[in-house]
Each structure stands twice: as C-alpha cells, then as structure tokens.
Image (cartoon, helix red, strand yellow):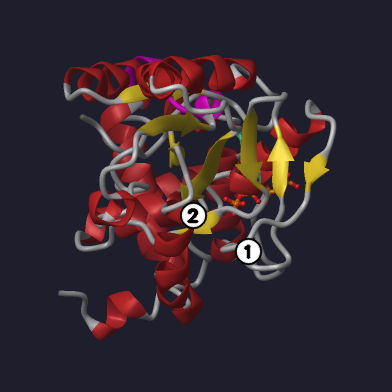
C-alpha cells in the first residue's frame, strides 16, 4: 500500500495511463522493458508482471555506459537464470541497439514457427517499449526509428496520434512508449531514483540525497571518491562536503560554504559519469 507521501512523487497521469497501456499490450507480440542499468531493481515497475501478463518480454538494461559493468553483468546473470531475456544497451550512443531486433526474433521464433505451421499468413510482429520516466524510452525510440525507413498508418485499437515505426519488413514498434512508475516502497529506492535523476530533484531533500550518495560511494566506491575529490574513509558528511567545497571553490562572499552548489556538483558528477560507472542497486 502506498502512502500519500510516496504517491505525490508521481504524477497522476502515470496511474491514469495504466489502463491504456494494458489495452495496447493486447496488440503486442513482445514488450521491451527498459530498465536503468544503474538501478535495475528500483527502476522496475512493481506491477510489471500483472501489467504485461503473459506476453513475452525482453529486459533492456539501458544506460550501460553509466553503470558499473561488473554489477550489470551480475544482474544479467541473475535475470537469465530466472528465465528472462536480457540485453544491456546504451540508447544514447546506440551501443547494442542493433542487437534488439535479432534478439526479439529469436524470442518469437517458436511462435512464428507455430503460426507458419498452421498456414497463417506472415504479419508484422508488434512491440512496444515500457519503462519508468527518464529511463531512456524516447531516446531508444528515436534511435530505432533512425534506422527504419517509414512510419506506417494508424491502426485500429490504438489512439489516433500513435503510429507504428517499421523496423524492417517484418517488425513494427509503437511510436509512443508506456510510462510506468518505479518501485518506491523502500526509502533506499527513493534515494537511488533521486541520485540518478529518475525522479525530480526537490522531491526528496537535497542534503539527504547527497548524504546518502556520498556515504554510498564511500562504502562501495571509495577509490573513485578519493580520486575525484580527495575524500578519505575517515571523513564524516560535513567534512566530505567541505573537502569538495574547498576543492571546487564553493564559497560565498562571507567565506561560508555554498552548500547548494556543492550538492549540485556531486549530483551532476554522478549523473554525467565523471566518477566512472556506478551502480546503486546491488543484486
Ligand atoms: P524517457 O523517454 O524514458 O523519459 O527518457 P529520455 O529518452 O527522455 O531520456 C532521459 C535522459 O537519459 C536523456 O538525457 C537521455 O539523453 C538520457 N539517456 C537515454 N539513454 C541513455 C543511455 O543509454 N546513456 C546515457 N548516458 N544517457 C541516456 P537528458 O539529460 O534528459 O537530455 P540530454 O542529455 O539528452 O540533453
């Protein structure tokens, strides 16, 4: 059960769109579920299985360029053992995006063979992208549509403004993704989402988020913290802030530290890969 405080993190339209998503999924042969490779657990919708029901799905670990590859691989192995199809991608640069379609064809091979054996006419396979805000859905759609020639006409059953993007002769992607909400029953998850920018800044107090981030990095990536800011193991939160503030010249006129600027530096360094690949969920 979600508390009021948790619900206010997420705009009402996300809940409203749920029924629409469920309708659209009925038309799909396959669903691409986009996860943030830095937080595969937190970025997975808690109701995913209910929403997708029995449809085949491919888990795409996006933003692999920002994640700790070793941890991403551990997640991939875990999900594969659980019977999921997985692929890590970087939709921004396009890395591995060309593997999506061949993988989808492999997943659907049995179904296609069955239809063929029944003598059914070949039809284009249909898929859509689902994921939480900011996970890279639009980036991936743009990336996939760049490599495709045309958009096809509207299809009954789908809202007028939506179209199918042809990915070759035999595959079509819905041009509008389904927006889902992330897990948020655990305060840690909220911090992970805030640190990576999956939920808007100011939803959680910035000093709390940065405190969580620096302590997390101190525990899990101490070398990176030391290399970037000269932060060492024995420093408490305030000392860490002052060390960064001194290094980066975050001082106000009276000689006070400019804390909001320090918070901004830490978060933007994490989000822009200045510390190297980081993962916030661990399997
Ligand atoms: P959404 O539709 O799921 O809400 O996400 P969207 O595609 O808008 O992507 C959100 C942000 O994530 C964008 O950055 C986008 O460039 C970035 N992004 C998407 N995929 C990847 C990826 O694989 N790697 C990296 N590093 N970034 C990715 P933004 O800051 O909002 O805009 P901009 O930086 O592109 O200007």
Is residue 245 among the parts visible in the rendering?
A: no
> Where does the N terminus fall, quadrant-wise?
bottom left
Q: Is residue 26 inside the magenta stretch?
A: no
Callout 1 secondary element: loop
Residue 168: x and y in percent read 72, 24
Callout 2 secondary element: loop
Residue 98: x and y in percent read 64, 17
Q: Nearer the viewer, residue 217 or 148?
A: 148
Quarter of the view holding residue 274: top right
Residue bearing the label numbered 2: 198
Residue bearing the label numbered 1: 255
Label 2 CA crowd tier, 10 Å (few <14, some 14–19, many 20+): some
Position above or below: 188 against 73: below
Is residue 159 among the parts visible in the rendering?
A: yes
* Residue 266 horizontal side relative to residue 216, left or right: right
Q: Residue furthest front?
A: 119
Ligand 1, by image quadrant, is: top right
**Residue under the image location 81 percent in, 32 percent down:** 146
Q: Nearer the viewer, residue 245 or 151?
A: 151
Quarter of the view holding residue 183: bottom left
Q: Residue furthest bottom?
A: 4
């Amino acid at each position: 059960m979600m508390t009021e405080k948790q619900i206010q993190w997420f705009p009402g339209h996300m809940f409203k769109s749920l029924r629409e998503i469920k309708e659209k999924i009925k038309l799909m042969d396959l669903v691409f579920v986009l996860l943030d490779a830095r937080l595969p657990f937190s970025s997975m919708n808690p109701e995913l299985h209910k929403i997708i029901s029995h449809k085949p799905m491919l888990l795409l670990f996006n933003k692999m360029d920002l994640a700790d590859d070793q941890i991403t691989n551990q997640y991939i192995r875990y999900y594969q053992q659980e019977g999921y199809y997985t692929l890590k991608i970087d939709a921004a640069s396009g890395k591995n995006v060309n593997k999506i379609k061949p993988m989808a064809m492999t997943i659907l091979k049995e179904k296609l063979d069955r239809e063929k054996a029944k003598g059914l006419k070949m039809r284009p396979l249909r898929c859509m992208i689902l994921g939480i805000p900011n996970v890279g859905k639009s980036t991936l759609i743009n990336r996939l549509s760049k490599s495709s020639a045309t958009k096809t006409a509207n299809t009954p059953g789908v809202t007028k403004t939506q179209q199918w993007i042809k990915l070759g002769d035999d595959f079509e992607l819905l041009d509008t993704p389904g927006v889902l909400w992330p897990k948020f029953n655990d305060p840690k998850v909220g911090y992970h989402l805030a640190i990576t920018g999956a939920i808007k800044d100011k939803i959680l107090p910035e000093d709390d988020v940065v405190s969580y981030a620096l302590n997390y990095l101190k525990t899990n990536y101490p070398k990176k913290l030391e290399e970037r800011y000269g932060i060492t193991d024995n420093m408490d939160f305030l000392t860490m802030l002052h060390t960064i503030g001194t290094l980066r010249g975050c001082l106000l006129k009276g000689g006070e530290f400019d804390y909001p600027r320090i918070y901004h530096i830490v978060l933007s360094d994490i989000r822009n890969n200045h510390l190297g690949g980081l993962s916030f969920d661990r399997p």
